[in-house]
Structures are given as C-alpha cells and as structure tokens.
Amino acid sequence: MSTITKSYQTLVGKLEEISHLNGVMATIGWDHQVMMPSGAAEIRSEQIAALAGVIHERMTDPHLEDCLDVLKEENITSLSKIERCNIIEARRNVTLEAKVPKRLVQEMAKLSSQSHLIWVAARQENKFSDFAPILKRFLELKKEWAQCVFPGMDPYDANIDNFERGTVKDEITPIFARLKDELIPLIKAVQDSSYQPNTSFLHGKFPVKKQEMLARQISQDIGFQFDQGRMDVSVHPFCGGSHPTDVRITTRYQESNFIESLYAVIHETGHGLYEQGRMLEGRSLPASESLTMGIHESQSLFWERMIAQSKPFCSHYFETIRATFPENLAGESATSFYQAINSCKPDFIRVEADELTYPLHVILRYEIECGLFDGSISVDDLPGIWGELMFKYLGVKPPTDTLGVLQDSHWSGGAFGYFPSYTLGAIYACQFYRSMVKELPDTEENISTGNFVPIKNWLNEKIHCQGRLCTPQELVMQVTGEKLNPDYFVSYLNKKYTEIYRLS
Ligand code: ZN
C-alpha cells in the first residue's frame, strides 16, 4: 500500500471518529432543547464541556497533522475529487482550530454560557444597559479571533466567512443596497393599497393534535423520511441530528395560530431534506457536509417560500387544510388562503416577519454589525440607531428594547456575521427555483397535483449531493449559469405583491 493511501486511510479513521463525537454532541444538544428535565441543566453543561474537550483534543491530535503533512496538494493528484475534498476540508478545520489560542477559546466559551442568561434577563426586563458590557466584550473577542484566524482580513469579513465562506462585505453591500432601493417603496405601496387581503380566518382555535397531524403529513409528502428522522417540539424550531440517517426537526404549537407552526415545519423539513439528501459516499466525512449557512437556508426557504407559499401548493392543499379545520375555513377558497398567508405587515420582530419585510430586518442588523466592527457605531448608541433604522426601512419604531435591539439571541452567543445568510439564502432560493422551472417546465403542474418527487430529486442532485465539492460561488454558477443575482428575487417579490395587493 502506498504512503498516500495509508495516510489517507488513517486520516479517514480519525475524521470519522471526530464526526461520531460531533454526532453525540448534536444528539445531547437536541436532547437539551427537546427532552431534558430542567433540573439536569447544570450537569448537562458539564457533559457538553467534557465532550467538547475530547473533540478539541482529537482535532489537535499531532497524528492528524502528520497525515495532512503527507497528503499535501501536490501528492494527492491520484486521489478522487471527494477524497481530495476531504483532505482540503480537514486541513482547513484543523488549521482554524489550531490558530485560536486556548485562552481565547475558553474565554469565548465562558462568556457565551454566561451571556445567554444575562441576555434573557435583560430582554425580559427591557434593560439594554445590562447586556451592553457583554456585547462590548464579545466584539473585542471576535475581533481578536478574526486577527488570529484570518490575519490581514477585515475582521467583519472574517466573521462572515465563519458562516458564509468566501463571501465578503464588498459582495453583500451592493446586493443589500439594491434590495433597499426596491423593497422599501414596494412595502410602502403595499401598506397604502386600498385592497388588503382578509386574514381573520387564520386566527381562532386550531387544536394542536390536528395541527401536528397536518404538519407531519405535509412534511412526509414533500419527502422527509421519518425512518431516518424525527419531528418534536421545542421552544424555537430548529433542524439538528447526528447524521443524514438521523435528522431531527422541531416546531412549536400555538392553539390560536396554525400557520406559524405549519410553515416552521415546512421550513425545517427543507433543512432536513438537505441533510437526508447528502451524498452516499463518506457520509461521516467533511466533503459530504452541507456547504454554508446561506445554502442551507436556501433549501429551507425553497420549500417554505418558493413552494409552500405558492398558488399551486395552496390549491393542492387547501381542501385538506379546510377539512382539518372546517369551522375556521368554511367560507374560504384556495385563493383567499393564498392571499392571507402571503399578507405583508411591517412589524418589530424578525422571526415573525413576512417574506417581503424580512430582508429589511436582516439589512438593518448587517449595517449595524458593519458599524460595530469598523468603529462607526458604538454599543451604547444601539437602541437609538435601531429605532431610527426601523423607522426608515419599515416605518415602525419599537416601543421597547425588548421588541428592538434585544430580540435576537445571536449576539449573546457572539454570532456576528450570521444574519446576512438568511437573506442570501432567500436570494439563492429564488435563483435556484428559476433554474429548476427552466429545466423542469412541469413544476407548477406537479406542485398542484402534489407530485414533489421531481423537485426533491432535482435539489438532491444539484445541491444536496454536491456537499463541499465546490464553493457557494461555484455552486450557484454550476446550477444557474450565473453568479448570485438579486434581480430574480426583486422581480419575484414585485410581481407577487403587485398582484396580491392589486397595485398599479
Ligand atoms: Zn432556517
């Protein structure tokens, strides 16, 4: 056996072990949010810390580096594309792990476990000043982290790279500027329109048992495999799990509103289909893993927005939904249902925002993060700036910080650079959808008859199976023949909302 083959096999063994340990971590993380009794919180954080220590040890194992030293770029030309990708990804992960001093890792971990509770309390008591010192410290640490891992790079770009590798401010800023130019006047026109869809039938009493049955059925219809996944309840919906054969999605139920839960399930199913659809070769190795947060979000939004908020989807499912909640939907039609679930109303909270106002919530956070990193915005000024930008973009001003700057958990965990992924995901989703319809002209017909197999297969082949074999920039080029282009997203929104709100 050649040295290369032997080193590669050793590397694979080590990477698989790390992946299994991460799988265990994901399972106890899921348990933490779904099943764990609250009394176990303390011991669970000890268990997580212990396991994190073991994973860190494995990642910094000198034998791993020895293998990577043998498997240099020029030595591995005889290996397959997937094998080479596993090596490149492993090298990136190991290098990133090694570049951050232990002291910094520990301080960030400690701050993040303390800050979550401080953020929860500050949000509850509407006291931004209690959270501000934590935020300041996190910014310092994240700037230092950027300096360690990507010296010479703009520190905010380095933080974005953590979630959206290869994407930088210079690419995002003009895309977001275009969205602002187009969406702010469109939202205003929608609000001023004399025609407003009736949404009253979406509020009422919707038994949770029935909501769950409906959500499970739709999740299964669009392709989620329940023999390789589960659906449960948690405070915030998410998609987790330990492996493509063990994908865990969650939702939450409110008796007064079934749409929120149903569309959360469809959203998380989209994430779940990405995980279940990963390539069959080397499923515990890095080449098979999902590409970036933005591409992951493109898959959830593809199903939630492009498919499930479309007319053909509403026409296919309306009778099933009406049969589930006959009293609430008695006098309604597929058209009135379609209009109601797509209604637009500027409000304070990002996670409850509709598809048209959501990008403005993200752009506001992105601009604030840019300012915090380049020093043009100071933490103490955040509540005021938040209110000003909300008013400028959405015409509303949150009456409290709880409904404003304190609403998201991201900053309490030091996750700067994460927000852009949500809107990049929406733009990717729209561009992917357009290419799919070109290649599969029967798509709308298929949706309206409940035949989702061709759609799932297309996404599987074009995106899910591609793993990390290319960059997001290469993927979008490969799938759509051009680079990320916000024009499609803008014209999709313009066309859809002009029609619903009878503008022009
Ligand atoms: Zn998502």
Image: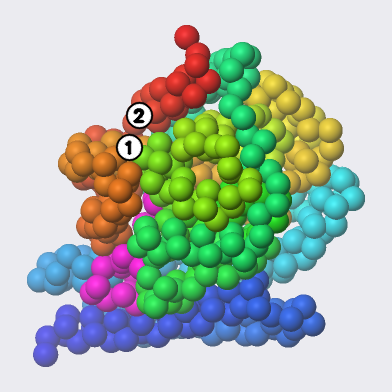
Query: Mark 2: which amino acid?
Result: Tyr
**Left or right for 362, reference 429:** right
Residue 314: horizontal and vertical position, in percent? 44, 42
Residue on which disc 1 sits: 431
Residue 265: horizontal and vertical position, in percent? 52, 58
Total numbered labels placed on residues in the image: 2
**Residue 450 on the magenta segment:** no
Q: Is residue 35 above or below residue 92?
A: below
- From the Cβ of disc 2, is ligand 1 less than 8 Å away? no
- From the Cβ of disc 1, is ligand 1 less than 8 Å away? no
Give the residue drawn at x 78%, y 33%. Answer: 398
Give the residue drawn at x 30%, y 81%. Answer: 11
**Residue 287 on the magenta segment:** yes
Q: Which is more toward the observer, 458 or 202?
A: 202
* Quarter where residue 479 is shown: top left
Q: Is residue 27 above or below residue 217?
A: below
Q: Tell me how far mark 1 sits from mark 2, CA to CA.
A: 6 Å
Q: Are marks 1 and 2 in contact (CB under 8 Å)?
A: yes
Residue on which disc 2 sits: 488
- For the record, the magenta segment spans 275-299
Q: Which is more toward the observer, 474 or 231?
A: 231
Q: Which mark is residue 470?
A: none
Q: Is residue 396 above or below residue 193?
A: below
